[in-house]
Image (cartoon, grey):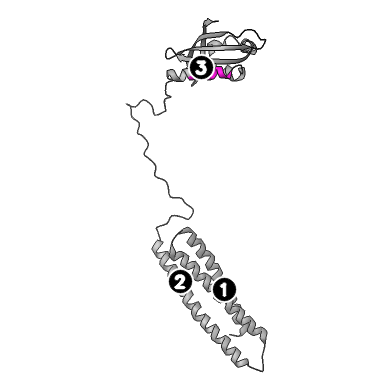
Amino acid sequence: MNRAGSIWFWSLLGACIAAALGTAINFATDLKTNFLAWGLVVAFTLAAGLISSISQVLVRRDGDGPSTTGTTNVYNVQHSQVNAWLVFLILGVSGSLLAAIFVGVHFAGSFQTAGTPIPAVIAPSPTTSTTTSTTSTVPRPATNEDIAQFVTAYYRLMPDTRAGWPLIGPNLQRRGQSDYEAHWGRISAVDVHSASATSSTTVRVRITLHYRDGRPSPTETHELTVVPHDGRLCIDADTLIRAK
């Protein structure tokens, strides 16, 4: 084989090794921490470097042209280097192929299709029978503390009627939203002194109303009926107990 043919041969071989290196990198990435797979990447990298070096030497030899002095000695030195690189190349490629075969055989069948995640462990779903009523979640009934906190939070929103209107029930809403807004429109602030449940549906609350026109601020005691409606709590009745 002439020198030009040798250059083409080693260049094509280098391209093949580079392609094999890319495949080995993907293979090693799939295997994560497998040392044999990463060793394969290293081996192909070294092989690619050796082939690149050989190609450069051949190119330099073609570019140097014939020389009348010392040609035989230089050629022999370069030829010896090429032979040494060939030995390392053969060993590297052979070792790489052996490693690839070993890894492929060892892990064949133990991996799922690339990109397919391993399914998580799924707990068995509860079985249904005629003795079980339903599997849906039933809301926890409101406690006395819950309804007392709800009333306190409601009055702290006032006089924000846009936030307060959805928190009253159908019974109080019958009076109309315009009357509701007119009542709270005269008030600038509300002080909540106490709120305690007297039953599972009633709360006694003591509040002070501050009027916008500067009139004396009365302190009132109300008894409110708190009931669930459409999955939430609402104030459905308001009775004035005391005012002073």
Residues 85 and 126: in front is 85
- The residue stretch that appears in magenta: 149-158
Residue 233 in view (yes/no)? no
Which quarter of the figure is the N terminus placed in?
A: bottom right
For the residue labelled by badge 2, is the local secondary structure a helix, a strand or a loop? helix
Which quarter of the figure is the C terminus placed in?
A: top right
| For the residues bearing labels 3 and 1, Cβ distance under 8 angstroms | no
Query: Residue 14 got which mark?
Result: 1
Q: Is label 2 or label 3 in front?
A: 3
- The residues tagged by marks 3 and 1 sit, at their Cα atoms, a distance apart of 80 Å
- The residues tagged by marks 2 and 3 sit, at their Cα atoms, a distance apart of 78 Å
Residues 29 and 19: in front is 29
Which residue in the protein does label 3 denote? 151
Q: Is residue 152 magenta?
A: yes
| For the residues bearing labels 2 and 3, Cβ distance under 8 angstroms | no
Image point (44%, 64%), residue name? 35
Q: Is residue 110 above or below residue 82?
A: above
Say few, some or many: other residues with alpha carbon within 10 Å of mark 2 (under 14 / 14 to 19 / 20 or more): some
Q: Is residue 157 above or below residue 58?
A: above
Which residue in the protein does label 2 denote? 97
- Taking the image as shown, residue 162 lies to the left or right of residue 86, namely right
Residue 162 in view (yes/no)? yes
Residue 97: image x %, image y %? 46, 71
Image point (52%, 72%), residue name? 46
Q: First in sequence, mark 3 or 1: give its number.
A: 1
Say few, some or many: other residues with alpha carbon within 10 Å of mark 3 (under 14 / 14 to 19 / 20 or more): many
- Taking the image as shown, residue 100 lies to the left or right of residue 54, namely left
Which residue type carries mark 1? Gly
Which residue type carries mark 2? Leu
Residue 204: image x %, image y %? 48, 11
- Taking the image as shown, residue 150 lies to the left or right of residue 52, namely left
Which residue type carries mark 3? Val
